[in-house]
Image: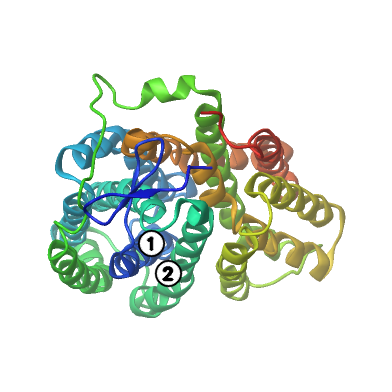
Amino acid sequence: MALAPQQNAAGSGETGDGAAHVDAPELRLFVVGLFFIFGGITSLNDVIIPKLKALFTLNYTQAMLVQFCFFTAYLVIGIPGARLVKKIGYMRGAVAGLLTMMVGCLLFIPASQNAVYALFLFALFVLASGVVIVQVVANPLISLLGKPETAHSRLTFAQAFNSLGMTIFPVVGSALILGSLATVTADQLSGAELEAYRTAESRAIVHGYLGIAAALAVVAAAVWMFRNRLKGERHEASAGLAGLDLLKRPHFGFGALCIFLYVGAEVSIGSLVVSYLMQGHVMALPEQSAGKLIGLYWGGAMIGRFVGSAVVRFISPGKLLACAAAGAIALILISISTTGVVSGYSLLAIGLMNAIMFPTIFSLASERLGSRAADGSGIINVAIFGGAVVPLATGALADVTGSVGLAPLLPAACYAIIAAFGIYARRPVAV
């Protein structure tokens, strides 16, 4: 844990590792709002995937390029995003990220007008690039806006609003985007009629993201008003690929690996839910009914984060992380070894176990980074690329075994490594 801050002339605290802490409730409100926004935007991928799949008559591999392009932004933009934030500061960095997200939303207009799948993928990549920059800002900033000894709790609480966005946005997005699907399908058309159909049907996507673009512009303007609020903000300069040297620190390197595995496991389980619940020996649900239950998975994460933000004040974060990961493994084993509602709801309950994992892994890995916090956040955002890699491997496991029923074993292996990190990181980093 960081040392208790001592007040400086600017009214902010500075820890023994050089990280400034500011008591600014209004900034915490803005940062929590950022978590809500980028969580909701990320979850909209699950809504537009079936829409684009139908419009462009894609197979599942082609449709999953939506997730791949989105999460690839974390790999490409993570380190440059950290360098940008270090150069212009946290608040201006947040504005840059929000404006980039707005541009990504606006790119859906030419994508729709030209009815080209590759343009939709490019728009998603730009949108995700803005999300990455905002995350580079939000994760360390929420830790700095308050007492260092409650940083784990604040980050977990903020992540709960991330899950709230992931729970609400798909519901609204489904009504706006999926509700417009016509009775005719793209595979029944060709030539000019097909292009006209794709242009008309993709307008629903455009309308949804234009609304998001307008909201992002308002939030960016509000954040800009507070651009000079953080006094004495300091970032350590670094050469080359900023932050890669931090991977040599065992605590941070292990934590970055666990972020890769956690995001991969979380996205994998979420991607399996519908197919898993449709199995005859599980719940034998129709596709639409199974899809509605996805909200229980993300809703469980939301509830768990609100609860976890309080629990982590009294229990060692490392021990709590290890217990949550062990719980996820237990639920997976119960799910694949049982049938009916027990099997189905055991898988959905993993969302509750996921609740505290990302914020706890992040804060444990980032202990005592001090003025290297932006570098560390950039590397951890690169590690979110696991959301593109692990799901593909999980799908391959399902293909090899011939059943989606055993596919959760790969996420279980990821959770096992995360549990080991929790045990390893249960003690604070040495000075």
Question: Is 204 located above or below residue 233 in the figure?
Answer: below
Amino acid residing under circle 2: Gly
Badges 2 and 1: C-beta atoms under 8 Å apart? yes
Residue 210, percent from left and from top: 19, 70
Q: Quadrant of residue 378?
A: top left
Residue 48, percent from left and from top: 38, 63
Give 176 or 218, whichever is nearer the viewer: 218
Residue drawn at 52 percent across, 59 percent down: 156
Instruction: Tell me how the rendering is colored.
Output: rainbow
The disc placed on residue 165 is 2
Q: Secondary structure at mark 2?
A: helix
> Mark 1 sits on what residue?
35
Residue at the far right: name it.
338
Mark 2 or mark 1, which has the lower sequence index? 1
Q: Residues within 10 Å of mark 1 (few under 14, many from 20)?
A: many
Residue 286, percent from left and from top: 64, 72
